[in-house]
Image (cartoon, coloured by chain):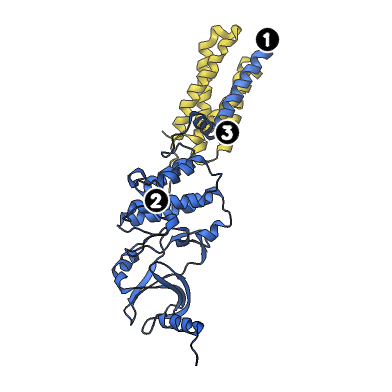
Chain colours: A blue, B yellow
Amino acid sequence: MELNDAVLDHLRRVAALPDLTGTRYELESEIGRGGMGVVYAARDRQLDRRVALKVVDSALAGEARLIARLEHPGIVPIYETGTLPDGRVFYAMKLVAGARLDHYMAGAPSLGERLRVLRRIGEALSFAHARGVIHRDLKPQNVMVGGFGEIYVMDWGVEAVAGTPAFRGPDAHLDRLSDIYSLGAMLQFMLADSAPRALLAIAAKAMREDPAARYPDAPAFLADIERFQEGLGVEAWSEPIWHRLRRFTSRNAVLLWLLAAYAGVKFLLFFLKIL
Amino acid sequence: MNKILVGLVFGLILGAIDGATAWFTPEVRPAIAGIMVGSSIKGMIVGLFSGWFARRVHSTTWGIVLGAALGLLFAFLVALMQHDHYLAIMLPGFVVGAIIGFLTQRMGVQEPAKV
């Protein structure tokens, strides 16, 4: 039998498939490859449900367990970790039904919805940072938007991962501030060209080349987003006076209309009396 | 500051300012102090009801509607006592009531519902 390239590729793929003998999982199909390893769809025979099974190198076992300890609504829950006969480590996690953020964005969601998604991502990041875990590879491909609007940040990074160029800052050493840069890049990605200046300024501040000039942490970034949503001035942009005035009038439009109505009524009565 | 207090404070201030505008009407100028006091009390009553309403219903639109209606009602009662100046009392009273209704919705602390 002749071994052509297609046959060799097939054999390589089959050989790389994880041997799940002795586990409760049954392999279904490969669903993705990330910096850390390969993700498969599998069936949990014991609980009769589908799960996502991530298989990583044994060197990453410790960090995989660290990520597994992150319990947050914005982080995909890990059900179980284990070791395969070939020494590789696997962890079973919730199989999220939904769309990847880059695909979700193709549906042109409203600005409010984009900011809701970004805030959920920021909250997950903030939670992980507080527990000493950094993502290292935050990008739209690593965020899932579930069918109920829930947001999951996936593929939490380990030392081996160096980030994705478009979403990675110039930092030589990846740390929390590198994640802030990526968060800013995500915001920029999620905004249209005609986005409000204040939001573009927030993204720009998060993406400053000098890490010290960025937001010091995710909560500070989120606070600026919240300020924008509440119609307040943002820390990232010292807006011109005319813009501040416009923001004030749009924020207090009803009150200004009522005051104008009062002044109008008084003037009307005054002139009616003269006439 | 709770919403009833917001209503009372703004009712007092706006009522006093509204009463003070009577200064522009020379024939009632001598009675301006009484007008200001009466207008302040009227504003405070509207503020009290608007604040009470704002604690129960969180809606700017309905706050404005109720405030305007109360402002109109109490201004009508005041005008009825004067037997005159119906338009000059009721029209500004209506708008001041709307402003108080708006402010009680937007300002002050929304107290948690009792369980």
Locate residue A125, reporting x and y percent. 38, 55
Which comes sooner in the sequence, label 1 or label 2? 2
Residue A174 against residue B58 in the figure, above or below: below
The amino acid type of the residue labelled 2 equals: Tyr
Q: CA distance from mark 2 to mark 3?
A: 45 Å
- Left or right of B28: which side holds A197? left
- For label 3, the residue is B64
- Left or right of B26: which side holds A24? left
- For label 2, the residue is A181
Sort mark 3 into few (<14), some (14-19) or many (20+) by Cα contacts within 10 Å: many
SS at circle 2: helix
The residue at the point 45 percent across, 74 percent down is A40
Locate residue A212, reporting x and y percent. 32, 45
Q: Which of the pair A90/A202 is nearer the observer?
A: A202
Locate residue A21, reporting x and y percent. 38, 85
Q: Chain of mark 2?
A: A
- For label 1, the residue is A274
SS at circle 1: helix
Q: Nearer the viewer, mark 3 or mark 1?
A: 1
Which quadrant, please, contains the C terminus of chain A?
Answer: top right
Sort mark 1 into few (<14), some (14-19) or many (20+) by Cα contacts within 10 Å: few
Q: Which of the pair A119/A106 is nearer the observer?
A: A106
Q: CA distance from mark 1 to mark 2?
A: 66 Å
- Left or right of A26: which side holds A130? left
The amino acid type of the residue labelled 1 equals: Ile
* Residue A226 visible in rendering: yes
Quadrant for residue A42, please give it: bottom left
Quadrant for residue A267, please give it: top right
The amino acid type of the residue labelled 3 equals: Ile
The residue at the point 56 percent across, 15 percent down is B21
Residue A4 against residue A254 in the figure, above or below: below
